[in-house]
Image (spheres, rainbow, N blue to C red):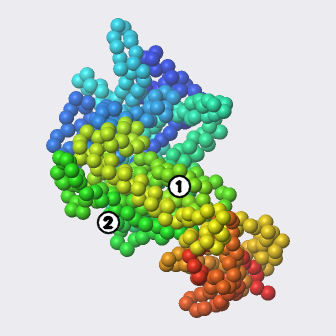
Amino acid sequence: MDHRVKQILREHVFTALPDSLSDLSECLESPDVHAIEIFDRGSVGLNGPFRASEVAQDGEKNNFNSFVFDIGSTKSSGRSGGTFGFGKTASFEVSNAHSVVYWSRCHTHDDEVEHRLIACSLHNEYEEGNARFTGAHWWGDPDDDDIVPLRGDAAAALGEEIFRTHFGDTDEGDPETGTSILILDPVITVDVDEDLDARVPVRTDEHSEALIQQVSDAVAHSAWPKVVPNGEDSRPMIVKLYENRVERQVVDSTLAEYGHFASSLNSIRQVQGQLEYDYSVPLPVGTVRSQCFPITLRPRGALLSKKEELFGGRKDNTVGHLFLIESAPLAAGVERAAPHDVLCMMRSEAELVVNYDPVVEPDGGVLQWHGVFKPTPECDRHFAASEPPTHDRWTPDAAETEASRYVVQRALDQIRTKTKKFLSENKVQTTVQEQSVRKVALGLRSFVPLGLPPAEEENRDSPRRRARQSGRSAKGRRIEAVVTNSTPLPNGRGQIVDVRPTGARGQSVALSVDTYAITSDGLLALGDDEVTISWKSEGKVLSVGTDCVAQSDTEVQLRLDTRTPAALEISIQAEAEV
């Protein structure tokens, strides 16, 4: 944090500090103190009444009082992200000084644009001068014994001195609204020894780098739905991460890591009418099969709740949708941060991740699976009502109404039943004596993971293996075959793979493919009598068989037709045609 900013905070914001806020005094004097600046733009900002004692009028938002003064209060509606209000204390927990500064630009009740700035510290309770204090402190503009935010031009001027990101105008020329939060002296969790972690303030470049990585991982893990596009040029939220004004890549890595969940979410969005017209996202390369299940309830028995209480305005009794994908790992031996073999539970309109549920015990098979469950907008309130203050699970018995308890419990029962059934459909139940490579292969579906088969050690000395490792064109450009898309054929009897050979412009590239069936006993090479191979480009057949010659940078379609359903692993080699 700049020396000038710390000076402004000491002299014009956090003034007259009591002894109980020694951590805040220390951080404002430290030469190595860091800060986190969080901002959003395009939101309505902290609008509504700005005195803690003032009640919002009918139809008026109460965002300022709710966010700044009503810490830990419960929302009357569960339609937005938070419900209990404890998330508002998170910024104080991240701060070693338990202190933040809020700066917002919003429309007033009279539709005027106004800047608002206030600082807050949330510390432990304490006693001073025979009086008890809650530990909550606010710095703003004293007004009739109330603390209110600094407003107008004064707030704008002070905010621009403290914060790096200012408010501008929208593309339409209107004043930009939103909120900025400055978290002072952030802490990071570090390993002390094998069994103990410690939270220490960020005071070194090493800790700063680790904090940035933790923030990036947390955004991906908990907020990946926010960056999944729901149209050609739109997504729910534009997320950017900066370190000392240098942007750090976060969206692309999130979409790459959480691609299976993203495809599942967009499939549900499509069913629930939440995608732009004609917009869709293909399933990830390597998909074996996928299926969307509506979670529909049929109330019976002594249930007292009316249908409207259970399903809102829905006539089909659907409370949510479950989408499951079974696929092959994209690369053997590569560790990924995103979880797999789990079901992601999320809220509906806010699209916030609640938790990842493994549902079943891992079986150690070759395939992996991902899934998403998302309630319908009409029934999201039931799931919100069943969440604890930590928002990390759904507990039916925690809901106050019979309707919510019934919907959540029955939905969870169906979700687990359908997931287990989906995953068991591809299992082959045979004894060890009866099991053969062929029988196991017949029971599996088709997919194409990227990378070489596990048996590459056997092929290490083959010419094709060497060409794949070191092949280059005369002009030095690496020759390789890039898989751009993959689509299973009906009934699991093969795969269509889109391949782009690369090399020098206009150069001919020799392509070849090795095809294997994946079984519990390992890989089984398929012969000509078990798989038919054809190559096309621009609708014309280039070759039939394992080998093909194509021009560099052209789209080539490789089609593999198997005699019986089989899980496939393929290895495509490319070398210069001589």
**Residue 234, position as x, y percentages in the image:** 40, 63
Q: Is residue 453 above or below residue 130?
A: below
For the C terminus, the image quarter is: bottom right
Closer to the camera, 250 or 266?
A: 266
Mark 1: secondary structure: loop
Using residue 388 as the reference point, say whether residue 475 is left or right of it: right
| Label number found at residue 273 | 2
- Residue 127 position, x and y percent, is 38, 12
Percent coordinates x, y for residue 112 in the rendering: 24, 46
Query: Hey, what amino acid is under mark 2?
Result: Gly
Mark 2 Cα shell of 10 Å, populated few (<14), some (14-19), many (≥20):
few
Question: In this rendering, is residue 340 above or below 386?
Answer: below
Where residue 305 appears, as percent x and y from the top left, is 18, 48
Task: Point out the tag, 2 or 1, that comes first from the N-terminus.
Answer: 2
Q: Which residue is mark 1?
A: 341
| Location of the N terminus (image quadrant) | top right
Number of numbered discs overlaid on the protein picture: 2
What label sits on residue 248 in the rendered view?
A: none
Q: Residue at x 53, y 27 (%)?
A: 27
Quick one: 336 or 396, which is closer to the camera?
A: 396
Mark 2 near mark 1, Cβ–Cβ under 8 Å?
no
Question: In the image, what residue occupies the spot 34% across and 32% down?
Answer: 72
Type of amino acid at the residue the image marks with label 1: Asp
Rounded to the nearest angstrom, the CA distance separating label 2 from label 1 is 27 Å
Along the horizontal axis of the image, is 85 left or right of 228? left
Instruction: Please name the residue shown 49% across and 69% down the image.
Output: 289
